[in-house]
């Protein structure tokens, strides 16, 4: 046998009825010998004893084989049955003994191998021929009697080969299923690690953005606080000699303080964490947009047409692009409205972020492609890794950030593997 695994299901279902029928035929053969003419001759009694005596022995051996836990034990039991069938084959005549002979050789082939079945068949034929040759019937009669037995045992070998091939195919399938399940377990573990890595990377990106924005906030707020301090100091010195100038400085300090407070609230709101850390795709963009709406910025997020399937890498890239774009819209464009759209264009997944530019900035935001800073360079590198790219430019009175990702890579290698594994499991 190829392994210590039990018989394949089809063999387990077929064997018991075949074994019962073959044993019943062996018992009928014994009865037939006893009732045949001449009645109760010594030869008849000997054949009947062989048939009737081997029936329970074979039955016990087959019962034990069905419950044997190893291939070695099954092989020993099947070999013992084959040896016990030799006297059955050479005693009497071929008839009701055919089923038990064929099945015994077939199980020997299944449990030991084709060579063992051939050896058993040859032993039966040779023994029968020799016994007839040295007996009263003669060599010719022995040879003529052995030919049909050899043919029948050949059928037994063929049946055993069929059982054995099915058994091997069944256990190859079981091994393949076990290997597939093991591979799926490893893949699920790898996916879990990828998701944890993506979450950590997302948090690191957020931390980097918060630190960078905090430095900008510190510089802007520090400058305004310095102006407020200087204005109040001047007003304190001039309040006696020039009260109007002093009050003008106080008014300027008040306006500067209001600007500083508004800017601080804007940046604190922009730096607040996304409310749903588990969100991906358009849902993640909506979550980060919500965190910016408290600044007074009007943000619209929508999917154009069919919402694209996004893996961890693609989702993280769009999330990062939305954060960078919204931050820059507040910082550089002083925008009041931003529209974020995600859709499929040809073979690409495309995210566009369009924001207006405050009229007071004038030419403060140059027309044409924007100078790539740290944030845009990082986005471009991530997009190129996914077969796409990033463009950012002023177009008239609006600023457009566009991120393209190859649609085939957007779903992500790991997510694609998981989908194929689930389909294979079904």
Image: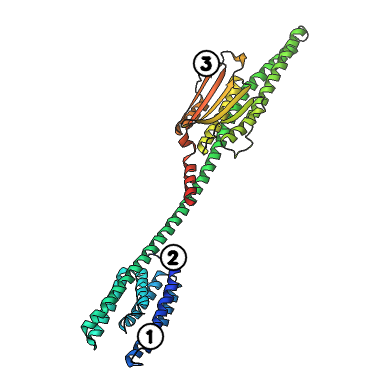
Side of 152 where 383 appears, left or right: right
Labels 3 & 2 near each other (Cβ < 8 A): no
**Secondary element at tag 3:** loop
The foreground one among 342 and 91 is 91
- Height in image: 252 above or below 67? above
Q: Position of residue 147 (x, y in %)?
A: 26, 76
- Cα distance in 3D space between marks 1 and 2: 33 Å
Residue at horizontal 50%, vertical 37%? Answer: 313
Q: Position of residue 385 (x, y in %)?
A: 45, 33
Q: Quadrant of the N terminus?
A: bottom left
Q: Point out the tag, 3 or 1, that comes first from the N-terminus.
A: 1
The foreground one among 185 and 302 is 302
Query: Splitting the image into 4 quarters, where does residue 331 fall?
Result: top right
Disc number for residue 32: 1
Comparing labels 1 and 2, the label whose residue is closer to the camera: 1
Disc number for residue 367: 3
- Height in image: 395 above or below 93? above
Q: Position of residue 389 (x, y in %)?
A: 47, 28
Residue at horizontal 53%, vertical 42%? Answer: 195
**Secondary element at tag 1:** helix
Q: Position of residue 182 (x, y in %)?
A: 47, 54
- Cα distance in 3D space between marks 3 and 2: 77 Å
Query: Splitting the image into 4 quarters, where does residue 135 fall?
Result: bottom left
Query: Splitting the image into 4 quarters, where does residue 170 fall?
Result: bottom left
């Amino acid at each position: 046998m190829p392994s210590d695994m039990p018989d394949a299901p089809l063999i387990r279902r077929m064997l018991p009825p075949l074994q019962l029928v073959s044993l019943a035929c062996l018992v009928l053969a014994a009865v037939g010998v006893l009732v045949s003419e001449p009645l109760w001759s010594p030869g008849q009694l000997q054949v009947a004893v062989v048939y009737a005596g081997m029936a329970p022995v074979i039955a016990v051996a087959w019962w034990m084989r069905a419950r044997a836990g190893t291939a070695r034990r099954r092989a020993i039991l099947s070999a013992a049955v084959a040896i016990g069938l030799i006297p059955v084959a050479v005693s009497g005549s071929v008839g009701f003994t055919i089923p038990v002979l064929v099945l015994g050789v077939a199980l020997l082939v299944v449990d030991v191998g084709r060579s063992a079945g051939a050896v058993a068949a040859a032993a039966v034929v040779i023994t029968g021929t020799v016994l007839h040759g040295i007996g009263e019937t003669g060599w010719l009669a022995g040879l003529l009697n052995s030919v049909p037995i050899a043919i029948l045992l050949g059928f037994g070998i063929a049946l055993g080969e069929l059982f054995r091939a099915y058994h091997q195919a069944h256990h190859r399938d079981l091994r393949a299923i076990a290997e597939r399940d093991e591979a799926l377990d490893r893949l699920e573990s790898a996916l879990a690690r990828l998701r944890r890595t993506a979450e950590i990377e997302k948090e690191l990106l957020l931390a980097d953005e918060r630190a960078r924005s905090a430095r900008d906030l510190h510089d802007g707020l520090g400058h305004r606080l310095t102006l407020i301090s200087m204005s109040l100091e001047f007003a304190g010195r001039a309040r006696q000699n020039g009260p109007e100038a002093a009050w003008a400085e106080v008014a300027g300090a008040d306006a500067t303080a209001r600007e500083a407070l508004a800017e601080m609230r804007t940046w604190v709101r922009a730096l607040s964490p996304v409310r749903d850390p588990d969100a991906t795709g358009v849902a993640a963009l909506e979550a980060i947009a919500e965190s910016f709406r408290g600044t007074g910025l009007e943000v619209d997020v929508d999917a154009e047409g069919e919402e694209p399937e996004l893996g961890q890498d693609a989702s993280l890239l769009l999330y990062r692009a939305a954060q960078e774009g919204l931050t820059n819209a507040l910082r550089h464009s002083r925008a009041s409205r931003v529209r974020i759209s995600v859709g499929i264009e040809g073979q690409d997944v495309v995210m566009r972020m369009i924001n207006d530019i405050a009229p007071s900035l004038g030419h403060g935001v140059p027309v044409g492609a924007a100078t790539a800073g740290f944030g845009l360079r990082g986005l471009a590198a991530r997009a190129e890794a996914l077969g796409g790219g990033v463009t950012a430019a002023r177009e008239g009175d609006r600023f457009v950030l566009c991120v393209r990702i190859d649609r085939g890579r957007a779903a992500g290698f790991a997510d694609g593997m998981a989908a194929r594994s689930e389909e294979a499991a079904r």
